[in-house]
Amino acid sequence: MGIVDRTVKPSFSKSLFLGQMASEIVMPYPVFDPAEKVRVDASVASARDFLSNTYDPWKAERDGWVGDDVIRELGERKLTGLFIDEKYGGLGLSQSGYCRVMEEFGRVDGTLSVVMGVHQSIGSKPLYLYGTEEQKERWLPDLAAGRKLAAFVLTEPNVGSDAFHLETRAERQGDGSWLLNGEKRWIGNGDKDVLTVFAQSELGHVALIVEKGMEGLSTGPRFQTLGLKANHLQRVHFNNVRVPAENLLGEPGDGFRIAMNTLNNGRMSMGTAISGGMKQFMQLSLEHTTQRAQFGRALIDFELVEDKIAWMNTQIYGLESMSYLTTGLVDRGTADFALESALTKIAASDTGWYALNRAVQVHGGEAYMDDHPLSKAIRDFRIFPIFEGSNDVLRAFVALNGLKALSEDLPDVAALKLSEPAKALGVIGPYIAGRVNRALRPEKLAGVHPALAKQAAAVAEQTVELRDHAEAALRRYGKNVQEKQLVQKRLSEAASGIYAQVAVISRISGVLKREKGEIADGASHGRSAADVAAEKTVAVNFCKRAAREVGRQLRGLEVNDDRYTRAIGTRVRETNGYGYSL
């Protein structure tokens, strides 16, 4: 039996392209139930204790590996099996709980967060999501305990973002086993123990569990990278590797869907790990700028310095809100979270890099020294906009999925002719009426605290504008919109900004309602009025910034320099470089 479509609700982000605000999906903001909060807090405390008192990221970088002793101790603390069911030896945390603990790894060391993310977010996850009971009993206990590490084996020398056209082949044998041949590259944990390998077969894509030591399996040489130097990034070779029939995940033909769904899950922990890193960048910046003085004043007293730290604080709040709203979609049983996962990954990796740049700037030359933690972070963080889905590819993915959903909601105007005005009126009429209704009555986000009414109204207006601009793009370009990547980028960025604002509005609404006793989950009780007011200020500031950026992206769909960009790009190709001289 193949993989069952488990969609319970539509994608919230797809609904934005339709000009709709599916409030029931994002309101109220998800919070931990008291029982799980106790377990998550204990795991966070355990991770923080180990990372603060035992783990040495500089030693790991010098040694070129985080250390088998590190993996063993993390396993003893059950930090290598955060989401795996307790019956297999894991902690059984929710997606939100898992991602909260991963934030601690990101705060201390990008490399360790990647090793743990590869092992759990994408390495063990296919088994957890799609394995049979026998497969889970066979492999998950060792993976949960850290006795073995997992890898996700997809990328090939000629296959990166276009993961559908794999060249690695798996041929089914008469006894049901598979003969695997091909080469993979850039595989984290590729020389470790349990590898989920994706290949083409005559029956479609397959996902196969390959174990270390199988005849015909070899790895290396290891890639030498700019950063993440304690991560084993490997070439993996398959030369007639015979994989037993019982090592097939799902059914033949399920492989591509297993790979994509795994990546959709895995991207979420990147968002929270990066927010953890950003918190560390801000903390280091705060300490440096309060302790160092120039011109008789602490650095933080200068507005251009304070501006950078305030920006970091605001962006962390927005990213954190976005990340945990997305994990909450999973925990609530919302199956269609692919676009939200992609938007979170894009926002996290881009914003994390911008925050790191600001942190380096306020440190001055000190952060440029090789032994400074921000110098190491520069090397480690630059990969995040590239792997687990390049940001440019994910932007196209979001926009094209949103446009596809919208196209299914539009009348067919492809065959309209000016010589048939009656026919044109009959088809265009509902479209015009719908547009007028949207303009008069933008759909509001339901359940928002009254103090956020202005922000809720603004995001509703932006949603209507997104629909109108997306519709205009479809009508202008038709199927050719698939080639208009600058259009796709602007639509995706606008959708991202709207989703981020919704996440922030949902979160701060919950905070304000709890303070008034309107919700009784206890998550924010005991805070001072000043603390709550300060949080509201951050939330409102984030929404204002995001709204301005959404407006800029949507205006750019109408007024832009794209034709000049295209002309210049064409000329550069023709002249094979810079073609002008003094």
Image (cartoon, helix red, strand yellow):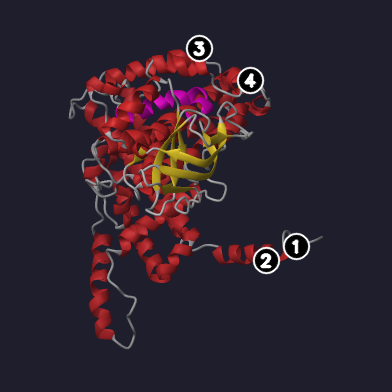
Amino acid tagged 1: Gly
* Most common SS among magenta residues: helix
Along the viewing direction, whichever of 303 and 418 lies nearer the viewer: 418
Distance from the alpha carbon under mark 4 to that under mark 3: 33 Å
Amino acid tagged 4: Ala
Q: Residue furthest right?
A: 582
Dividing the picture into quarters, in which one does residue 416 lie?
A: bottom left
Q: Image point 49% across, 63% down: which residue?
A: 559
Of tags 2 and 4, which is closer to the observer?
2
The answer, for residue 212, to whether it is visible in the render is yes
Contact? badges 2 and 1 (CB < 8 Å): yes
Along the viewing direction, whichever of 418 and 553 lies nearer the viewer: 418
Dividing the picture into quarters, in which one does residue 419 lie?
A: bottom left
Query: Which residue is identified by label 3?
Result: 54
Circle nearer the N terminus (3, 1): 3
The reply, left or right, for residue 255 in relation to residue 484 is left
Distance from the alpha carbon under mark 3 to that under mark 1: 56 Å
